[in-house]
Amino acid sequence: MLNKLASLANLAVDIAKLPVARLEFRRAINPLDVERMHKYFTQPHPRYRLFQNKSLGAALVCLSRYKGRDDYMQSVKGRNSAEQHARKAKNKGYVMVAIDRNDYVDDIHEVNTSVDVRQGRPMDQTYMEKQTHYPIDKNHAYYGVLHPDGRLKAYCDLGLYGNFAAFNRLMGVRNNDGVMHLMVTEVICQMIEADTVDYVMYDTCFGASPGLSTFKKMLGFEPHRAKFSIQ
């Protein structure tokens, strides 16, 4: 009991130190989807019931920190860095483009089933079953990284909810070509250039596997205490 109380006390101290980000959901963008995601983000945390689901350690890139694409890429530059991996992918001929996922049904299934375990956990069965049609939501952007031969090697679904955008699905093959780094850095750069949102979110930092935590940190995601509102 004492150990549990000590852990909770340490957690409370860590939470208090986090920078606060005010994330606004705006119904006008797409009422049903925005309200659904607001409900999911603000429901009780599965472990710490006093807190909202995505409020603790929200993994965010604060876009206002960067003057432009070059400024952001400079911030994730270095040895074995996100910039280095993204550059490697570009040098190999990969490109990131906006996609309609329905044009890449077979490739997406191949990406989803390319490995059985990700981040130390077996793939969810929903990923292993081939989806033959993907809905298109007006407040979502869909991107893919294409191999020089035109095949899709990574893809993501980016939801636009208000003053922030959030990755809902982010998947790629494991080929050490830097395709995931290319995709995420390019999405963030495009968000900076568009200047329509204040933050890009990639779930939370707390509870992520060591590999995923390192990946997020490389890309500039930092833990925040998120405060949500809806209008």
Image: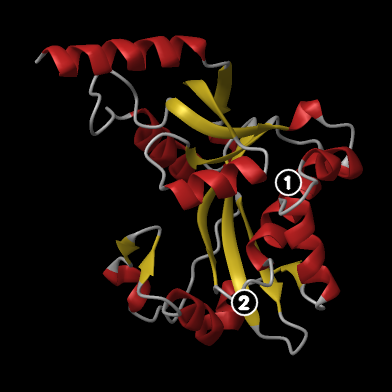
Between residues 176 and 107, which one lies in front from this camera angle? 176
Instruction: Using residue 6 as the reference point, say whether residue 96 is left or right of it.
Output: right
Q: Position of residue 186 (x, y in %)?
A: 76, 55
Classify 206 as above or below 87. above
State which quarter of the image contains the N terminus. Answer: top left
Residue bearing the label numbered 2: 153
Mark 2 element type: strand
- Among the two numbered marks 2 and 1 on one chain, the one whose residue lies closer to the N terminus: 2
Between residues 13 and 50, which one lies in front from this camera angle? 13
Classify 110 as above or below 31. below
Classify 91 as above or below 56. below
Residue bearing the label numbered 1: 188
C-alpha distance separating marks 2 and 1: 19 Å
* Residue 230 visible in the displayed image: no
| Residue plotted at (53% across, 23% down) | 224
Instruction: Using residue 96 as the reference point, say whether residue 139 is left or right of it.
Output: left
**Which quadrant of the view contains residue 60?**
top right
Instruction: Using residue 12 as the reference point, say whether residue 213 is left or right of it.
Output: right
Residue most toward the bottom?
149
Residue most toward the left?
1
